[in-house]
């Protein structure tokens, strides 16, 4: 692919400064994560000015370079701005977490297309129950990563969930007690309105993530704390 000009759709994962007027822009494309140099993007007459930002879906054209891994961004046209995210800082924080997860785990090659579709779906949905959305997204990420837990088989009022096997029915060395209500929440988080049950389910997934993935738990903990304090998620007495 080096030496070729490539045209593709892409989700902007992040932007960082490269020089006084230039940026490095990281994208998720249907073929995987790439980084491009947007030279002179902050110049007043630049054709790239205002054409990209985190959470945008864009159509981009870049010149592929093999040696540096930083490709030259030639064209960029925004397809989705997702401006509503700018009005809700808790939702914006959750979307940053979604982008972080995908950037860390999405593969290169054709399999990246499913990850891009998942990320776009996560960015586009506007439900108020952010903790449920977080759980739904995390479980979908595990499925794409080939680490999907088996969330059926919890029959007793409280059953052991085996973290190493990801199952209620396949015994393992490490386990944690999970109630039927929490197991049901894990199976269909978007249907749950009770914040306490959602947070208990989030604890299970957090332990599962930390066991199976090299994952900084403090990032997740901070995001969860932010979104759980949103008024729209205060359903503890439902």
Image: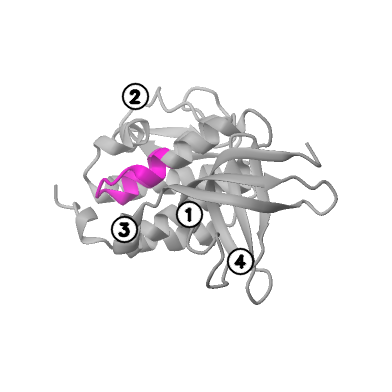
- Would residue 189 be found to the left or right of residue 213 on screen? left
Residue 177: image location, x then y, percent: 42, 39
Mark earlier in primary sequence (3, 2): 2
Q: Residue at x 64, y 28 (%)?
A: 110
* 2 and 4 marks in contact (CB < 8 Å): no
Magenta region: 121-137
Q: Nearer the viewer, mark 3 or mark 2?
A: 3
Tell me which numbered mark, 1 or 2, is placed earlier along the sequence. 1
Reading the image, the residue beneath label 4 is 16
Residue at x-position 40% and y-position 42%: 122
Question: Residue 121's quadrant in the figure?
Answer: top left
Position in image of residue 217 (x %, y %): 54, 57
Residue topped by disc 3: 228
According to the picture, the residue beneath numbered tag 2 turns out to be: 155
Q: Secondary structure at mark 3?
A: helix
Q: Report the disc number at residue 3.
A: none
Prevailing secondary structure class for the magenta stretch in the rendered image: helix
Describe the colour scheme in one phrase. one colour
Q: Is residue 122 magenta?
A: yes
**Total of numbered circles in the picture?**
4
Crowding near pointer 4: few (<14 within 10 Å), some, many (20+)? few
- Look at the image and tell me whether residue 201 can be seen: no
Q: Of callouts 3 and 4, which one flags the residue occurring earlier in the amino acid sequence? A: 4
Mark 3 or 4: in front is: 4
Q: Nearer the viewer, mark 4 or mark 1?
A: 4
Q: Position of residue 150 (x, y in %)?
A: 47, 26
Q: Badge 1, how many Cα within 10 Å: few under 14, some, many 20+? A: some
Outermost residue on the front side: it is 45
């Amino acid at each position: 692919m080096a030496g070729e000009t490539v045209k593709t759709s892409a989700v902007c994962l992040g932007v960082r400064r490269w020089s006084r007027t230039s940026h490095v822009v990281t994208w998720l494309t249907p073929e995987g994560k790439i980084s491009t140099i947007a030279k002179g993007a902050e110049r007043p007459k630049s054709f790239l000015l205002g054409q990209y930002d985190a959470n945008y879906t864009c159509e981009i054209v870049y010149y592929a370079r093999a040696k540096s891994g930083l490709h030259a961004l030639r064209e960029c046209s925004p397809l989705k701005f997702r401006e509503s995210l700018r009005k809700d800082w808790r939702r914006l924080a959750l979307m940053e977490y979604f982008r972080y997860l995908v950037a860390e785990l999405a593969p290169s090659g054709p399999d990246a297309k499913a990850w891009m579709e998942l990320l776009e779906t996560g960015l586009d949905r506007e439900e108020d129950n952010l903790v449920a959305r977080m759980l739904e997204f995390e479980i979908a990420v595990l499925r794409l990563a080939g680490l999907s837990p088996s969330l059926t088989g919890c029959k007793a009022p409280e059953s052991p969930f085996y973290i190493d096997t990801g199952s209620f029915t396949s015994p393992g060395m490490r386990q944690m007690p999970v109630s039927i209500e929490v197991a049901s929440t894990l199976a269909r988080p978007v249907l749950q309105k009770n914040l306490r049950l959602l947070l208990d389910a989030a604890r299970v997934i957090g332990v599962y993530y930390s066991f199976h993935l090299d994952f900084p738990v403090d990032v997740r903990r901070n995001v969860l704390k932010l979104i759980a304090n949103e008024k729209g998620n205060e359903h503890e007495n439902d």
